[in-house]
Image (spheres, rainbow, N blue to C red):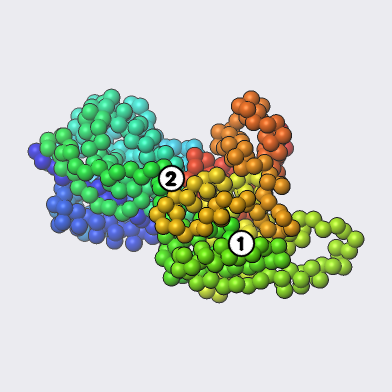
Amino acid sequence: MSLKIALAQINFVVGNIAANVDNIIKAAVYARDQLKADIVVFPELTITGYPAEDLLLRADFITAANNAIYQLAEQVIDIALVVGFPEQGEGVLYNSAVVLHQGVTLACYRKQALPNYGVFDEQRYFTAGDKPCVFEFNGTFIGLTICEDVWKSGIIEANKNMGAELLLTLNASPFNSGKIHQREAVICQQVKDSALPLVYVNQVGGQDELIFDGASFVVDSLGQTVFRAEEFKEQISVIEFDGVNPVVSTCAPLYSQISSEYQALVLGIKDYVRKNGFQGALLGLSGGIDSALVLALAVDALGAEEVEVVLMPSQYTQDMSNEDAVLEADALGVKYHVIPIAPAVNAFTEMLAEVFEGMAKDTTEENIQARCRGVILMAMSNKKGKLLLTTGNKSEMSVGYATLYGDMAGGFAPIKDVPKLLVYELARYRNSLSVVIPERVITRPPSAELAPDQIDADSLPVYENLDPILERYVELDQSADEIIAAGFKSGDVIRAITLVDRNEYKRRQSPPGIKITSRAFGRDRRYPITSGYRGV
């Protein structure tokens, strides 16, 4: 018997239950009327959005979410809905999926495998289910699973043992570089082992620091991907099953790793601005590589008319930095302002002269310059209602090479999880689409330009050495001895690790940023500020 299943790869808003229900209804009507689908499958926890975090601890929020299921059952007919929601039952909360058809609940499944690692903390909120769920629809027996379930051995097999002929899985699987290849490889092998076709529907969109990349797919009983939706885009698709065999359809090509990372950053900026109601974005443009990349990302996310930049030269700013910043703004068609910081720096220097008398100049004076810039940018952000984007990268955030309340001032940090070497790769990738970053911005030595002839290498190991050390220490949890044994200089390793350990207090005060690596600062890596632990 032919069965048409729609995959609703939709961008939902966490916490806005009414809007999410409206979007579910619109998608279901489209799938029914335009795609002639029999069933439409939505992502994990569709009703609330994912992750809803401690909203799930609110009784009124859970009541509203459960009431929304009744609303959907009453309003949508002639197509079956498979919807994720937080189910209140027996005094506990379940991460559940419900099947609604013609006003009737056909099945309700409770997620069994609750992830509690990395960015996930589902065991804080949910109780695990303990049994599979199979329902009959139009003569086909269909199993239900939710996200982590299909990464674990045994759960797919349990569905098959209950008579399932195909499997639907609802997902909110966040992006990190290379994740889509890992995701498909794991699922395809699981399906191949069980010989049970699978429909994998993933969420799309940005949610604070997480990006959901979509790329929903369908796997046949041989473990072959026969359909794939677009990455990073909303899409409602339909796949037809001839009996229990999916008919081969279109597979959207996968992005290269660098283009995938770039698209994730663009989507993260777009959704953070849009979902939080800002009137666009604002950033300080220095003529350096980091702010140049953030500007390109912001314009690609929001459009040139929604982005403004500010050049804030000091006595240490080189002429070529000012020239390059203007070239970048012109190339991307954004409005720019030039506000020299000398008057503010001089005023603070004069105000502090008495208390600083007899003390030598040090980084304090450098930081005053950065903080003057922060005040200017925040004032403009307040006045214009535009989100201030910071431009610090992961290498700088790791070692604290940034100024609290200065260049760290802002509301969102797009490249906070982008190591410096990757910044250069992303800049070259963006220039391969159209040249918007001057070549000398990419080739010149990076500098904060807060002191005469200053370059980053004066304070840090060169990034070619620093970034792989940081990856091993921050993302892979390797010890200093292990990193040194891998061939890195002892002095560089000790210096880098000491700076990482020392600067947790700075990172805790930084704005949220977009996760693209296997472990980002924030939800993904939570270290105590006050700690006797030292990596060296």
Looking at the rendered structure, the kind of residue marked 2 is Ile
Residue at coordinates 68% horizontally, 51% vertically from top-left? Answer: 455
Name the residue carrying label 2.
Answer: 258
Of the pair 206 and 54, the residue shown nearer to us: 206
Regarding residue 535, the answer to whether it shows in the image is no
Name the secondary structure under disc 2: helix
The amino acid at mark 1 is Ser
In this rendering, the answer to whether 487 lies above or below 347 is: above
Provide the residue designation for mark 1: 321
Above or below 472: residue 361: below
- The residue that appears at 82% across and 67% down in the rendered structure is 352
Quadrant including the N terminus? top left
Residue 340, placed above or below residue 437:
below
* Quadrant position of residue 21: bottom left
Q: Earlier in the sequence, mark 2 or mark 1?
A: 2
Distance Cα–Cα, label 2 vs label 1: 27 Å
- Residue 48, disc: none
| Residue 189 position within the rendered picture, expressed as x and y whole percent measured from the top left | 31, 28
Position of 419 compared to 87: left or right?
A: right
In the rendered image, residue 428, in percent from the top left (x then y), is placed at 47, 50
The 10 Å Cα crowd at callout 1, few under 14, some 14 to 19, many 20 or more, is some
